[in-house]
Amino acid sequence: MTTPAPKKLYIKTWGCQMNEYDSRRMADVLAPLGYKPVEEADDADMVILNTCHIREKATDKVFSDLGRIRDNKMEKAARGEKMIVAVAGCVAQAEGEFIAKRAPYVDMVFGPQTYHLLPEMVVKATGQRVINTEFATENKFDTLPAESGNTGPAAHLSIQEGCDKFCTFCVVPYTRGAEFSRPLAAIIEEAKRMAGGGTKDITLLGQNVNAWHGENGETLGDLLYALHDIDGIAQLRYMTSHPRDMHDRLYDAHRDLPKVMPYVHLPIQSGSDAILKAMNRKHTAADYMEIITRLKKGRPDIAFSSDFIVGFPGESDSHFEETMALVGQVEFASSFSFKYSARPGTPAASMQGLVRDEVASERLARLQELLRKQAQDFNSACVGKTMDVVFSGTGSKDGQLYARTPYNQAIHVEAPARLFGQLARVEVTGAHANALTGRVATAETVLAA
Ligand code: SAH
Ligand code: SF4
Ligand code: F3S
């Protein structure tokens, strides 16, 4: 008996790291059906576009890609071959019916909470179209197969999903559904499996990762203490955190646990209390500064990054100046900043006080200039320092390996290939806007995790 040729699976991913995690898991779910990931859509047997709905631009990209995929599908059909086209993720969740109408060549539309049902959907889709944007009653994490064998030296582990916070600008509570935490034991088991497969650097993922809670009232700090004991794990990170979910134990973890990296991605969005209130963030700029001060007290070398939105409805020049002042005070290691984009169905979309596009663009340019300078200063200050890193990829040049520093900077290090997957001490030799360069400090410094 000959085994059938593998079917080619092309997945394109937009948006946040939750989506990247989901894409990887979709491939795991489809593997038993004979699907193998490929790099090109042209000749694929199945194409999945895993989409993001966070801003208008993100959504537009999906439709422009779909046009190209339709051509690929037609070329295949002319050769008598079939291509299953699927739209997944947050655009699928928010605009499923619209996609189905506008793009009749799409065979499957499914949201972020139903992809564990892919095998059934695929069988159906060979005969008819499938639209599945329910919030499944069962939990996808209970149904998904174990992570496929080797997750690599640095990997993500999804521990929490969804959001109940309803910031007035944001689609996530609608596309991802209610907040949900995976049980502590399941996370520990998965982390041990990953460590057994050689993963040394784990980033815990969640839409509001510090809203994670265990069945017995444990919080993210407790989880970090538990993970810290696993042999083989050298570095622990987590993202994205919300200023409202900072529990005592998380401060303790940063103070006490050397494997917890001294870096927190903690979006504030705006430095103005009036705007924060209109955003329904339920924290003030002073609350944010208190968090920063307390984290620094336990771990003086800790660094921060944030997300910002400029041009939120009602944002005046002076509100914006408050954001600039806060940025000046904190000095971020890196940051993401965006122009406000009205999202259909969110409360902010019907608010008064729209900010003119030129004004918003000007503010964004000023903010980004300041953030860029802070990132450059932070990177420059790292030159000459030694840091422990896990080599997880090849560098940008021959003879280099790639890693993330404890502060989440990309670093390209002159290092022999045999150090791939190892934890090593490196010296930072150069700083650029988006990355560092370095060399292995000494050959003997390969560390046991
Ligand atoms: N859960 C995280 C981040 C979610 S989305 C948090 O609460 O911080 C990632 C970022 O996209 C947000 O932090 C915000 O800065 C940005 N964003 C979300 N909705 C947006 C919108 N309507 N317009 C512009 N930026 C937006
Ligand atoms: Fe969106 Fe706010 Fe929830 Fe973050 S906390 S996902 S910004 S609603
Ligand atoms: Fe985008 Fe959905 Fe993530 S809207 S940012 S892919 S949760």
Image: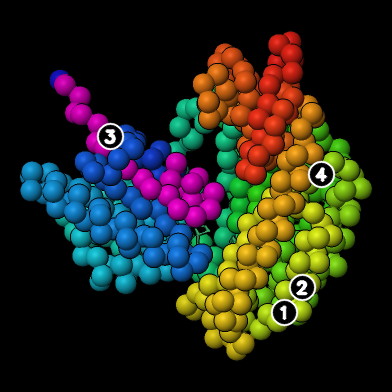
Q: Quadrant of the C terminus?
A: top right
* Residue with the mark numbered 3: 34
- Name the kind of residue labelled 4 in the image: Ile
Q: Is residue 226 visible?
A: no
Q: Which residues are magenta?
A: 2-24
Q: CA distance from mark 4 to mark 1?
A: 31 Å
Q: Nearer the viewer, mark 2 or mark 4?
A: 2
Q: Nearer the viewer, residue 338 or 205?
A: 338
Q: CA distance from mark 3 to mark 1?
A: 57 Å
Instruction: Give the amino acid at mark 1.
Output: Asp
Residue identifier under label 2: 321
Pointer 2 or 4: first along the chain: 4
Q: Please name the amino acid that badge 2 sits on.
A: Glu
Residue 104 as seen in the image, left or right of residue 243: left
Task: Mark 4 or mark 1: name the one nearer the start of the chain.
Answer: 4
Q: Where residue 412 sits: x, y (%)?
A: 61, 29
* Residue at the outermost bottom position: 352
